[in-house]
Amino acid sequence: MATPRIQIIADGTDVTGNILSGLLSLTITDGVGHDYDNVRIDIDDKDGVIAPPEKGAELQVSAGYEDDIQDFGTFIVDQVSLNGWPQVISVTARSLDGLSEAKQGRDQSYRKEDYPSYRDIFDELADRMGLSLALSNEIAGKSVEFESQFGESDVTFASRLGRKLDAAVSVKEGRLIVVPRGQGQSASSSSLPEIQVMRPGNVLSYNVTTVNVPKHSTVRAVWFDRLEGVDKEVVVQASEEGPEYLLRQNFQNENDAREQARATAAALKRGEGQATFEIDGEPSARAESYVNVSGIRSLVDGRWRCTTATHVFRGDGPYTTQLICEATV
């Protein structure tokens, strides 16, 4: 059986040995959205002599197996807890510094004259956040009419734009990553590895909930044409059956109305089912990966999309991966 392996470098110094000597658990969460990725390390400090990393320290985390170790990126320590008895040190680190300007509120308008495409907006956001930008061509080429950031941090604003554009927004390895949601793509537009969940095989437990959400054949959005002084509509196909879904918000332009209608149509489909699978440790599992399930039963077997992948390494137990999934569009 493959041997789990971790490596942790703190501010350029390899501290793996110190951590392994008292490791209770290492939890790596790879997700999408406002909270981004994080790492938690729990260490047995029974003698009270282990020096924890300082807040603000950079942790480079790699983990997996001896023959398949994966780079999970760099994380900034934002919380250190000392607990007793027994004495335990808990360290939490995130992919985005909690004290950075990215989390400070600001007011700004983005007009098409200055920001013709969403690449221009995300370029500026990434620059202010101190990150490089990894943006898919599909999102980059979308035209901007007008966007307003009112009292929002750059982090919150980027996440809101992602929801509008039906894009997955995350911070990983010093990059602001924006890719189409639900397409199993990395920031380079290449396909993420698909995860296999099998019985017999690697599945340890599962929970699947099917939701009887109302089906809608179309999504309708209303926008105001300032030149003609009248309301106009856009309609986007959502499914083969059901009544129309009307967005209550009136939009300022056709582009915004169409983007929101498309995102809503996709979200309605994804809401039809949720699943959680616990499997033997799978280092390649990431948020936005497709998950192929087989051998369990009807309503469970099939293709899912991972929204959060959590990797747990235990000092005295196995390495496992939890996949939180939703139905594919």
Image (cartoon, grey):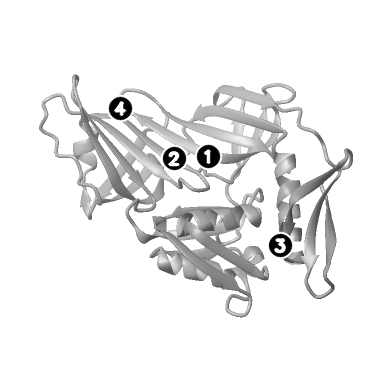
Of residues 156 and 78, the one drawn nearer to the viewer in this rendering: 156
Closer to the camera in the image, 321 or 79: 79
Q: Residue at x 52, y 28 (%)?
A: 279
State if disc 2 and disc 4 touch (CB < 8 Å): no
Residue pointed to by mark 4: 315
Q: CA distance from mark 2 to mark 3?
A: 33 Å
Residue, far bottom: 113
User: Is the residue marked by circle 4 packed among few (<14), some (14-19), or many (20+) residues within 10 Å?
Assistant: some
* Left or right: residue 314 compared with residue 168: left
Q: Where does residue 243 sit, x and y in percent of width and height? A: 88, 40
Q: Which residue is mark 2?
A: 29
Circle nearer the viewer, 1 or 4? 1
Q: Amino acid at mark 2?
A: Thr
Residue of label 1: 308
Q: Position of residue 309 (x, y in %)?
A: 50, 38
Name the residue carrying label 3: 256
- In three-dimensional space, the C-alpha distance between marks 4 and 2, rounded to whole angstroms, equals 18 Å
Is residue 167 among what the camera can see? no
**Label 4 or label 2, whichever comes before in sequence order:** 2
The mark nearer the N terminus, 2 or 3, is 2
The mark nearer the N terminus, 4 or 3, is 3
- CA neighbours of label 2 inside 10 A, class few (<14), some (14 to 19), many (20+): many
- Tag 1: amino acid: Thr
Alpha carbon distance from label 1 to label 4: 23 Å
Left or right: where 168 falls relative to 27: right
Q: Secondary structure at mark 4?
A: loop
Is residue 201 shown above or below 231?
A: above
Work out whether mark 1 precedes mark 4 in sequence or the reverse, and give the earlier one: 1
Judging from the image, what secondary structure is the residue with disc 2 in? strand
Tell which tag, 2 or 3, sits nearer the viewer: 3
